[in-house]
Image (cartoon, rainbow, N blue to C red):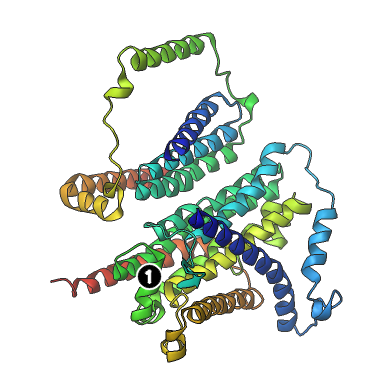
Amino acid sequence: MAELLITVVKILVIILVVLTGVAYMTLAERKVSAFIQWRLGPNRVGPWGLLQPIADGLKFVLKEDFTPPGANRALHALAPMLAMTPALLTYAVIPFGGTLPVFGHEVRLIVADLSIGILFIFAIASLGVYGIAVGGWSSNNKYALLGSLRASAQMISYEIAMGLAVIPVIMFVGSLKLTDIVAHQGANPWFVLSQPLSCLLFVIAAFAETNRLPFDLPEAEPELVAGYHTEYSSMKFAMFMLGEYVNMMTASALIVTLFFGGYHLPWVETLPFFQANAAWLALLQVATFLAKVALWLFLFLWVRWSLPRFRYDQLMGLGWRVMLPLALANLAFYGLWSLKDLP
Amino acid sequence: MREVFFYFFAALAVLSGLLVITRRNPLTAALYLVLAFFALAGVYVLMDAFFLAAVQVAVYAGAIMVLFLFVIMLLNLGPDDLPPIMTRRVRWLYAAASAALVLLFLGLDLGRRLPAPTPGAAGEVGAIAARLFGDYLLPFEITAVLLLVAIVGSVALAHRE
């Protein structure tokens, strides 16, 4: 019973943190873009614009929820949910700290340490495309349909390179569990150092999977109005937005977990103070994890406001003619490399 | 607890399977098929076959059905473009098939003759890998070649002009 309660609390805390994080990501996006373009950004609502997300949320709720004539009403309402749910589900298997002692319980800071860990993430992530595909089709709008077709093709193409980029990591660790992958990086160099190409391929694929610039063709404004969510308004549109930002946070958390040591902070963790106090160590690990994820989120914003968009054929060419062969060569190289440890 | 979940997922699988073959809109039918795959994955999880469940979702629900969806969306078939499914002959076929199924399960007690599932370590990744790349390596590789032949064939057909 206590186990169940602890799990429920963990789920609630994660959802709360992720959704608050997403709300402030929208503010951060506007602030960072303003900083990069030498503007001030939103600064009217609250000090330094800090209450802006609340104002935006209220505005979303109060807007008219419009379904275009000729649209498939049921699917039009279903699509935003399909876009947001898989994005949130992924957090179940991401470890954000070691163990935290609470009132005599050793609470592991992960919701479900599945034996298939990383496979679960790929399975769930592959469902993310349905929200976009169904949303675009059910809107009965040519721009929306084109946007969703682009998104589907793009996500399927880059999923392959993404999966192939992770396999060398799994080969080194010998386990699909994300906790094992993090523990391996606690004892060995981070995978970004031992497998830089895997990391680079994964990061590029992650940018494509989250439909962020330079890969945001599904919603390329000059060609497609707003792509798959052209016909969405009010909270349904907000859910697509939330899904996109949650995906970005998931991608950052995955990059950190797989290649940047997860919640480990080298040297500081081995200080006598942290070795003696398990609770402080756990808090340090959570803080480290959050800080690393925040750094990657900043990089996502930085890239968006610095790089132009790819052309569609360039995007597909990069995915199939560059990323895929490189990922295969990388896999073959580390496969042969790992043979040297075998008897 | 396990039983409750089993009946939930089994009922979901059967129900969504029925909806797949009765919906008039092809896209709705395809989405119910995705739901059926998902329910099957749930049943696999209850049998401790986590790997199979993940692959079921990633490959069938995530990749193959997306391609189906593509085709349906591009053809943009509405219910009016399709010939009626429920013709007289199909109705009779339905009735005959359902009767045969009920007979098989009640009369021959097929449900009890099926081998019982063996939950446990057999569904773990390591165990499956040992089987696939050890005992059944040759059939596995032949399947891979078969898939390659299919890919080469489809590329050749697409480039015929």
**Residue furthest left in the image:** A343
User: Residue A40 location, x and y as percent?
Assistant: 80, 82
Say which of A30 and B122 sits in front. Answer: B122
User: Residue A250 location, x and y as percent?
Assistant: 55, 65
Task: Tell me which corner region of the image, top left, top right, bottom left or bottom right, holds residue A165.
Answer: bottom left
- Chain identity of mark 1: A
Q: Is residue A227 above or below residue A73?
A: below
Q: Which residue is mark 1?
A: A181
Q: Which secondary structure, mark 1?
A: helix
Please rate how many residues cluster around mark 1, counting C-alpha atoms within 10 Å: few if below 14, some from 14 to 19, many from 20.
many
Q: Is residue A199 visible?
A: yes
**Residue furthest front in the image:** A104
Residue in view at x 57 percent, y 47 percent: A130
Quadrant placement of the C terminus of chain A: bottom left
Task: Tell me which corner region of the image, top left, top right, bottom left or bottom right, holds residue A88.
Answer: bottom right
Q: Is residue A11 above or below residue A180?
A: above
User: Residue A198 location, x and y as percent?
Assistant: 39, 72
Q: Answer left or right for A208 relative to A84.
A: left
Q: Amino acid at mark 1?
A: Ile
Q: Is residue A329 visible?
A: no
User: Residue A336 location, x and y as percent?
Assistant: 23, 71
Q: Is residue A78 above or below residue A56?
A: above
Residue in view at x 40 percent, y 45 percent: B45
Q: Answer left or right for A122 relative to A81.
A: left
